[in-house]
Image (cartoon, rainbow, N blue to C red):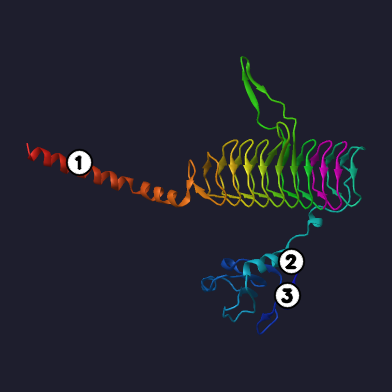
Amino acid sequence: MNSYKLSEIAAMLQLNYQGATDPVISGAGSVTDAKPGEIVFAEKIEYLENMTGMPAALIVPMDFETDIPAIRCENPRAEFTKVLSYFAVPVDSVIPDGIHPTAVIDPGAIIESDVAIGPFCIIGDGTKIGSGTRLAGHVVIEPNCTIGCNSVFYSHVTIRERTIVGDNVILHSGVVIGSDGFGYHPSATGLVKIPQIGNVVIENDVEIGANSCVDRSTTGTTTVKSGVKLDNLVQIAHNVTVGEHTAISAQSGISGSCSIGKGVVIGGQSGCADHLVVGDGVQIAAKTAVTRDVEAGKTVIGFPEIEIKKGYRIFGLTRRLPELFKRVRDLENLLSKSDKSQE
């Protein structure tokens, strides 16, 4: 594990530090469980008041007062993100250089000399893998795929035939790219499979979480555009387009032929019905079921989806239903007694 003096970290961040000492930092931690030797960040003074343990140093806003050695900056969270990278486990220690002798590589594959390939990987005929890419154990890349440069595929990733993956892509364990789309039509003898003859394109700088799936298109292409981040257990169906820099949280699903815009944020356990258009910058709250197109910039919540402010009002009234029902019943009883007294 790396260790640095606080002054060295400040220099790497191009910031200054203040403190009576220059402690050695051996890790980064949380303000709620700070340990000796760690550096933590705090955005609000209340975080320090509730801090447990004693870290070696802090990253805090410019106006914070503390006796602990500290780096002061305009955006502690952003600077702490950089610090985390200083203590991250290098990918080459997880996926070492070279090609493991158990890997099965078709003679027709074209692989750059510095590609790292772990044990029991399978690389199909006609597949091309760019410089600096690393494959952990048990990765399968089927024929005629194109994989870009400096990408990382962790164990048990499967890439089906004719898939295209760009540069700097991270695929976590169990990801499947290019599996058949879910397409059938009914017949007198049951469901008939519709051949899925398209492919998948994953553009640059995409990260896909563990056990997520992106299905190949029926015809044409399923596309995940540059900068998209998918959490674990996300399903992207056939013929979907996911726009640049969109983020989709765990256990969410996008049905076939949807178009998801740029910079969309989708909360966990949400879903979109098929053939919908979700505009740029839309925010979809967790557990939302989107059943209609959503205009750019909107924020929606609920099942079915509704504009968030209206949704909160409805949810608030729903919680008061037992009380409101009792008041209506009491009023009905009063009216009934009044009517009887006038008879």
Q: Are marks 3 and 1 in contact (CB under 8 Å)?
A: no
* Residue 67, image x, y percentages: 59, 82
Mark 2 or 3, nearer chain start: 3
Q: Main secondary structure of the magenta part?
A: loop
Q: Quadrant of residue 70?
A: bottom right
Front in this rendered view, residue 166 or 258: 258
Q: Write down the region rendered in magenta.
A: 125-149
Residue drawn where x is 74% and y is 33% of the image = 198
Residue type for callout 2: Tyr
Mark 1 or 2, nearer chain start: 2
Q: Are marks 2 and 3 in contact (CB under 8 Å)?
A: no
- Where is mark 1, residue-wise? 332
246 left or right, relative to 165: left
> How much space separates mark 2 and mark 3, taking CA atoms?
14 Å
Residue 133 within the segment the image draws in magenta = yes
Could you say which disc has been placed on residue 86 in the image? 2
Mark 3 or 1, nearer chain start: 3
Q: Is residue 4 above or below residue 287?
A: below
> How much space separates mark 3 and mark 1, taking CA atoms?
72 Å
Which secondary structure lies at badge 3? loop
- Local packing at callout 2 (Cα closer than 10 Å; few below 14, some 14-19, many 20+) is some
Front in this rendered view, residue 325 or 53: 325
Front in this rendered view, residue 95 or 235: 235
Residue type for callout 1: Glu
- Local packing at callout 1 (Cα closer than 10 Å; few below 14, some 14-19, many 20+) is few
289 left or right, relative to 224: left
